[in-house]
Amino acid sequence: MDREEVLCVTRSKGGLVRPCGQTPSGVVDLSVIDKLPVLRCNARTLHVFRDGPSDSDHAAMVLVRQALSKALVPYYPLAGRLLHSTTTGELQVSCTGEGVWFVEASANCTLDSVSCFEDVASIPSDKLLPLLEGGSEGAEPLILMQVTKFTCGGYVMGLIFCHSICDGMGAAQFLNAVGEFARGLDQLSVAPLWHRHFLPCESLTPKGFIASSSLLPPPMPNYILEQTNIDIPFHQINLLKQKFHQSTGGQTCSSFEIVAASLWSRRTRAINLSKDCQVKLVFFANCRHLLNPSLPKGFYGNCFFPVTITTYSEKLAQSSIDQVVQLIQEAKTRLPFEFHKWITNTNKKGDVIGEEEDPFAPPLVYTTLFISEWGRLGFNQVDYGHGPPVHVVPIQGSSIIPVGIVGSPPRPDKGIRLLTWCVEKDHQQPFLHNMTNLI
């Protein structure tokens, strides 16, 4: 019997949770990065909590709902709605205080009976993510949440977050605030700051950048990416780090660099491209510390920049993991310059740059691999009073954009869980074979 047949979820009627106190009204601007078209989408996640309040069937819902209402007072823009300025047409937030969408639900089984959704590929996410009812009028809420209580007392929080408002670190900061209120704190450990004017408005559409994929291979038609979980224990990662340390004469590297290098090189070997095919690796780096002055603690908007590495498939496939790690490290050292260039539209000499590919618009083709690091965002530390989640699951956004997400395995396991949607079916077995033979 598969998980779809085991799990039956009954939803209550959804409703809006508003701030529990008075909040400012008016319109607030978004940052240059917030307003990028690529971020006009929703991020979807599932947060699995093995333990919850045991005093009543609805205690978890009441606890989260009340804490959510409290958190929306200091985070009042999240209770508002997106709008376009009547004068400039730019995206803004109207602080209406309307609230966020909240759905209560119950499941007919225990979390153990579905293995705490350890197998991401078989999760019926449509049952665990919130639905916005058709009768809702006006603009869509910026946050939608569903809390599904299981018969064991645990629950799953399904979350849909507007990416134009927060990046992953910002969303985790908000959820941690909800958790602090749920645990009875009167004052947040981190006070939220909107602070969206940290970049000049001219950076929104830098004249020197163009979105172009003319130099890259054309997209592969009609492919569908297969979902694959790969768990890499810490001892294996540490062995690869030691090997890098020895082969480079004492240099060090991070777990993310090891995993990203392994995934990119092993995937490239598996998909068997022509030797002269150009391939790209893209990952997103936090840039809060690269601004002068650095963004203040409490900022919860988008502040990241794509790090892009381009090489040829033959060179990548023949490179060792150590050599690919060095490629990644070299690209990371260029991040401050590349970010500054995007902000100012100038090169190192201060000259205005000519036309270049827009870093926020890499080609969405089979030869471009996107990697995102989730383990350090803060989702795994959220605690509503009964311990952190045993599992945080990002839900696939697209079936045609090759993606790898570096996260954590379900507790109590240690190591790295690599969630991938990066190869089509014909390449899945060679890819898995390559990834299980890293050492």
Image: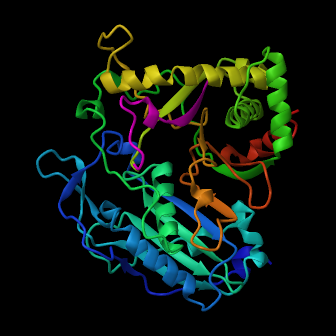
Which residue is found at the position 73% from the left and 48% from the top?
Answer: 425
Residue 224 location (% of width, % of height):
63, 49
Residue 276 location (% of width, % of height):
66, 17
Which residue is found at the position 56% from the left and 44% from the top?
Answer: 401
Q: Nearer the viewer, residue 130 or 189?
A: 189
Q: Is residue 285 within the magenta segment?
A: yes
- Horizontal relation, residue 157 to residue 133: left or right: right
Q: Quadrant of the N terminus?
A: bottom right
Residue 431 location (% of width, % of height):
78, 40
Q: Quadrant of the C terminus?
A: top right
Which residue is found at the position 42% from the left and 46% from the top?
Answer: 297
Q: Is residue 10 visible?
A: no
Extreme residue toward the bottom, this view:
56
Q: Nearer the viewer, residue 32 or 186?
A: 186
Q: Is residue 284 visible?
A: yes
Q: Nearer the viewer, residue 54 or 28?
A: 54
Q: Quadrant of residue 78?
A: bottom left
Which residue is found at the position 82% from the left and 36% from the top?
Answer: 238
Q: Is residue 130 within the magenta segment?
A: no
Q: How many marks?
A: 0
Extreme residue toward the top, this view:
349
- Horizontal relation, residue 191 to residue 86: left or right: right
Extreme residue toward the front, this view:
186
Image vertical order of residue 31 relative to residue 49, above or below: above
Task: Specify start and end residues of the magenta stretch as a single range.
Answer: 277-298
